[in-house]
Image: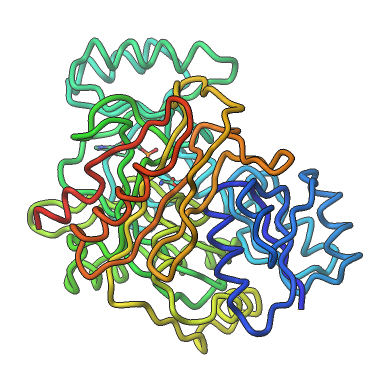
Amino acid sequence: MKVLVIGSGAREHALAWKLSQSPRVQMIYVAPGNGGTAADPNLRNVPISDPEALADFAAAEKMVLTVVGPEAPLAAGIVDLFKSRGLRIFGPTKAAAQLESSKAFAKEFMQRHGIPTALYASFTDAAAAHAHVTKHGAPIVVKADGLAAGKGVVVALTADEAHAAIDGMLSVPGGRVVIEEFMDGEEASFIVACDGQHVVPLATSQDHKRIFDGDQGPNTGGMGAYSPAPVVTPNVHAKVMQEIVLPTIAGMAKEGMPFTGFLYAGLMIDAQGQPRTVEFNARLGDPEAEVILMRMKSDLFDLLMHGAEGTLDKAEVQYDRRVALGIVMAAAGYPGTPRNGDPITNLPAAREDLMVFHAGTKAADGHVLSAGGRVLCVTALADSVRQAQQRALDAVRQVRFEGAQWRNDIGHRAIRH
Ligand code: AMP
Ligand code: GLY
């Protein structure tokens, strides 16, 4: 059987790699893929990104399943398009993907369904937004409404910072900001597979959004992750399912937008172990997917087929008991404009306990070149967080490309736990 993976990051490399382990899958196409998927003999890159052209390709090649990695094609309605053409696909419709694509939709939805989250207000008018900040004071959180790859959020420690963020975000045409109560606590990523009705929670994980060690510097798409997240104790896990995930799935179905695909709840867990939702994403996290899939022992293809067919109550998922930890190697300049086109050398060979998932790379006559902000995600399995961190760092320090940046402290919260 043939499967199509849409996207070009390390998440999609990990998805395709894991799918290639399924005995039922013969060929995996990755559109458009990257230098890592190009190098794997089990995978084939196809240079297509237009949704209609992807649907034509899936139909012509008799793809048994398509899975979508990134948010942009989901928000643009690629699932609706595939379904309208009778093509099996795992992902949310455009309406369901609003949980990620519109922060205002997500916040209003959570309010309607009593799902715990920060208090918020939404503004298109700058004067009203400024008055709100003046009234509530700092710390306060200002978010641009719309897809911003985790970069459209300012956690303002002073009112001045909040005012500046509002001016920046409302200066774009059609700009809208969401201003939120600041939540204190520890973050975790809670990702589930859904078929519209049934839910299978994946292993828990945590990522590190800031560019520098010690969680300093600007936000990025994610500089590293590990799984499991010790902050998600069995008690917290049960609360997240009862108070956040299950009401969300039931609420979406009730409102006529059943959620099929990966639902990612970004959580803030306070000192009492009470979880609240920071945000929803309508997809797997990146780099969370890399560490979750590195630990997954069961067949990913089976899980996705059950998801697409509405039979997730019959799915079984097993994980390696070891910890997986992934360190992102980013290009110089990231999260601003990244430097590109540098040769990447000394890549370690894949092992049972070490995988280098490619993100922004491309193959060019026998070489691998950097071609994006996040370039690689070096992912290791080991018996403890500390050992997994060491194993991943040993590999990271061996890889060479000009100006590479990475964090040396991925997993520090888990090590503290
Ligand atoms: P988001 O894109 O909504 O996930 O926000 C990016 C990051 O900003 C989150 O991962 C948090 O670290 C932080 N953040 C967002 N909203 C809040 C909030 N209400 N309170 C505290 N931190 C927040
Ligand atoms: N790592 C966070 C995300 O994928 O949104």
Number of on-image labels? 0
Residue at x 32% of width, y 48% of height: 207
For residue 17, side relative to residue 85 (left or right): left
Relative image position of residue 305 (x, y in whole percent)? 63, 78
Colouring rule applied to residues: rainbow
Residue at x 57% of width, y 28% of height: 342
Residue at x 15% of width, y 41% of height: 184
Quadrant hosting ligand 1: top left
Relative image position of residue 8 (x, y in whole percent)? 63, 47
Looking at the image, residue 315 lies above or below residue 114: below
Relative image position of residue 339 (x, y in whole percent)? 53, 22
Q: From the image, which quarter does the N terminus lie in?
A: bottom right
Relative image position of residue 232 (x, y in whole percent)? 21, 64
For residue 129, side relative to residue 79 (left or right): left
Looking at the image, residue 336 lies above or below residue 370: above
Q: Quadrant of residue 27?
A: bottom right
The foreground one among 283 and 107 is 283
For residue 41, side relative to residue 329 (left or right): right
